[in-house]
Amino acid sequence: MKKKIFIVILCVAMIASFSCFSKENRVFATGDTTSLSIYGQSTQKVLPDKAKVNASIQTLNLDVKKAKQEAFDCFEKIKTALLELGVENKDVQISYFSTYPHFEGADRSIVGYYANLSFDYSINNLENIQASIDKLLENGVTNVCGINYEVSNYKAIYEYMLKSAIENAKDKAKTILNDQNLQIKNIFEEECYNMNCIYKCYYELAQNQNYAENNQIEITAKVKVEFN
């Protein structure tokens, strides 16, 4: 009988001990230590308002110096035509230049030299893109590589999206806690992948003249806000 009583007492003690342990683990915060973390997000789609065009010139001559000179003469003629369209001088830049021999026949004889010159130019009026490309082709450009459509005031838009993301987090917190007097403790900017441009090949522009009007750039900002 004593043995049975001892076992019962031991079991009751173990249950009481387990109950106290469980209760302590369920206390997540008390008093002023209570806090809430909320993620906020804001997204805006923006039409690109400028573009950067990449093109190249290739010349071939028996004399490597003449091939080089022909390429640079062609570039200067193209640059003048672009300036007449309103492109600024600082926005027309050479990005790459090279020369190499041209071989022919089984014996790989050198029959001339190629000169390749690549350049970029920025244009702020998207309506003039096709007119500028026409000027390139009229003045000796051999390849229009591609076009980057960009948002000129990307930084300002992103900063506005950050503020909107914080407001989004505040609205969520008020909904959850039904409290209009929440205090912000910390704000953390979350990593968010954004592209400031849309790259397209020239033939895609040729197929769709209104490409920039129909394709927007999405800018997103995310934050983590701690309230107390």
Image (tube, grey):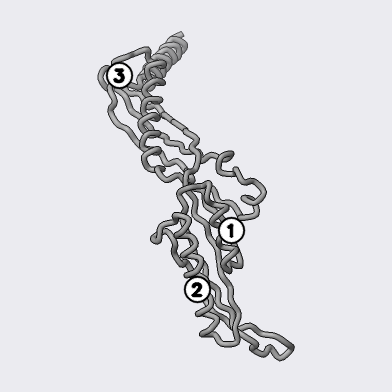
Res. 10 visible in picture: no
**Residue type indicated by callout 1:** Asp
- Mark 3 Cα within 10 Å, few/some/many (few <14, many 20+)? some
Q: Earlier in the sequence, mark 3 or mark 1?
A: 1
Q: Are marks 3 and 1 in contact (CB under 8 Å)?
A: no
Tell me where residue 139 appears, x and y as whole percent: 56, 67
Residue beneath the point at 32% across and 33% down = 187
Farthest residue to the front: give it.
Answer: 84
Label 2: which residue? Answer: 97
71 lies above or below 91: below
Report the side of 211 relative to 73 (left or right).
right
Q: Nearer the viewer, residue 69 or 45?
A: 69
Q: Secondary structure at mark 1?
A: helix
Q: Secondary structure at mark 2?
A: strand
155 lies above or below 173: below
203 lies above or below 79: above
**Residue type indicated by callout 2:** Phe
Label 1: which residue? Answer: 134
Tell me where residue 16 appears, x and y as whole percent: 39, 14
Q: Earlier in the sequence, mark 3 or mark 2?
A: 2
Q: Nearer the viewer, residue 174 or 63?
A: 63
Report the side of 193 relative to 138 (left or right).
left
Q: Earlier in the sequence, mark 2 or mark 1?
A: 2
Q: CA distance from mark 2 to mark 1?
A: 23 Å
Residue beneath the point at 40% across and 38% down = 157
Q: Are marks 3 and 2 in contact (CB under 8 Å)?
A: no
- Mark 2 Cα within 10 Å, few/some/many (few <14, many 20+)? some
- Discs 3/1, front: 1
Q: Nearer the viewer, residue 169 or 91?
A: 91
Residue 182, numbered label: 3
Q: CA distance from mark 3 to mark 1?
A: 60 Å
- Mark 1 Cα within 10 Å, few/some/many (few <14, many 20+)? few
